[in-house]
Image (cartoon, rainbow, N blue to C red):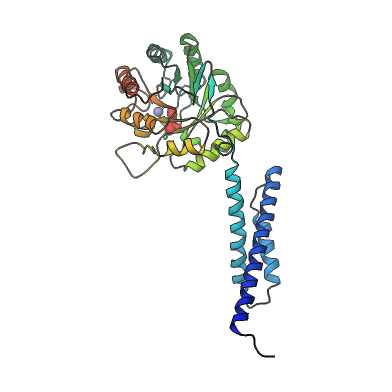
Amino acid sequence: MGSPDLDSLRKMLDDINQQLLVLISKRAEIVQEIGREKQKQGIPRFDPVRESVMLEELVSRNEGPFDDATVRYLFKEIFKASLDLQQKEQKKHLLVTRKRKSEDTVIRIKGIEIGGEKSTIIAGPCTIESYEQMRQVAATLKSLGVTVLRGGAFKSRTSPYDFQGLGLEGLQILQRIAQEFDMITMSEIMSVSDMEIASQYIDIIEIGAKNMQNFSLLKAAGNYQIPVLLKRGMSATLEELLLSAEYIVNCGNNQVILMERGIRTYEKWTRNTLDISAVPILKKESHLPVLVDVSHSTGRKDIVIPCAKAALAAGADGLMVEVHPDPSIALSDAQQQLDFAQFTEFLNEVKRSGLFRQ
Ligand code: PEP
Ligand code: MN
């Protein structure tokens, strides 16, 4: 029997390529099917043990001409491609995405809306220091038409030697002030064990940047029917932020507000780098409201106005800014908090810009 000519060898190769393509496509479909089944059962998609069993089985049957390492390499690539496909499919189905829900989520709290037609301002001191301090802030904000009051009771301080906040007493002050001035309140919670008590005192739970990936806290917040403001971690990608939001929504609480608060870069002239591009991207990818914290992102008072305008121009649903009766004696973030005159100017300028939806 003479050897086949080059053309027929090539034809055989083309046929095998096509058969391989049909087979790996079929394999990918089965992997997708398994992924959907695993998702239904709440089992993780990637199973390294199963992958290694499959590889060893293949290697044990290997009769060459490829050596075992090459067989492992080739199949690992096929496994990885199928897994990537599953990942893409799962991303498409995240509850927080526009692909899943096209219309904007509007959070309604005691007659106000966040993410609706009007822009929102959340203002107040970094830390709740006393009843008197909060009363002064609330009276000023209310007289200026600002109704969402923030203040930290459980403070996420970098140093353990810095003031850690008044804890429960702080939440009690906030609640009393809110009742006196008919305001909506927000405060940061750092621990799962504080969720229950906090939900009785405040209207919006803040999960701070340093806790964006505290998955137990995210799940706990997801188990309450209370609005949650989720801040972007200082080195978190937007995908990671959305996945953290997904933890909350997936547990049954769809009242989540996303907040860009600056990320850590090499730049030293601002406390963090305000990632303006995060705003249109988050608005495009997700139906959740997006707010921008102009205080922690910049760490300075002199540029909050242009940064606030930029945030609104980029499509933010609102802003957060720190306000203190006398920032020079504030127990935290003294350098970035606005005094009442500065806040009044801030508000006037932001409104005058025409970018603030009133
Ligand atoms: C805060 O908002 O009080 C705060 C601590 O901010 P961040 O989590 O963004 O650092
Ligand atoms: Mn602060």
* Numbered marks: total: 0
**Residue visible at 41% across and 27% down in the picture:** 319
Q: Is residue 66 visible?
A: no
* x and y percentages locating residue 37 in the rendered image: 71, 47
**Residue visible at 62% across and 56% down in the picture:** 82
In the image, is 213 to the left or to the right of 294? right
Nearest to the observer: residue 279 or residue 265: 279
Q: Is residue 223 visible?
A: yes
In the image, is 31 to the left or to the right of 302? right
In the image, is 132 to the left or to the right of 222? left
* x and y percentages locating residue 247 in the rendered image: 59, 37
Say if 84 sits above or below 277 in the image. below
**Quarter, ligand 1:** top left
Quarter of the picture containing the C terminus is top left
Quarter of the picture containing the N terminus is bottom right
Say if 93 sits above or below 187 in the image. below
Say if 95 sits above or below 29 in the image. above
* x and y percentages locating residue 159 in the rendered image: 41, 34
Nearest to the observer: residue 126 or residue 284: 284
Q: Residue furthest front?
A: 7
Query: Toward which corner of the image does residue 264 lie, by quadrant?
Result: top left
Q: Residue furthest bottom?
A: 1
Query: Toward which corner of the image does residue 339 lie, by quadrant?
Result: top left
**Residue visible at 67% across and 44% down in the picture:** 39
* x and y percentages locating residue 23 in the rendered image: 67, 63
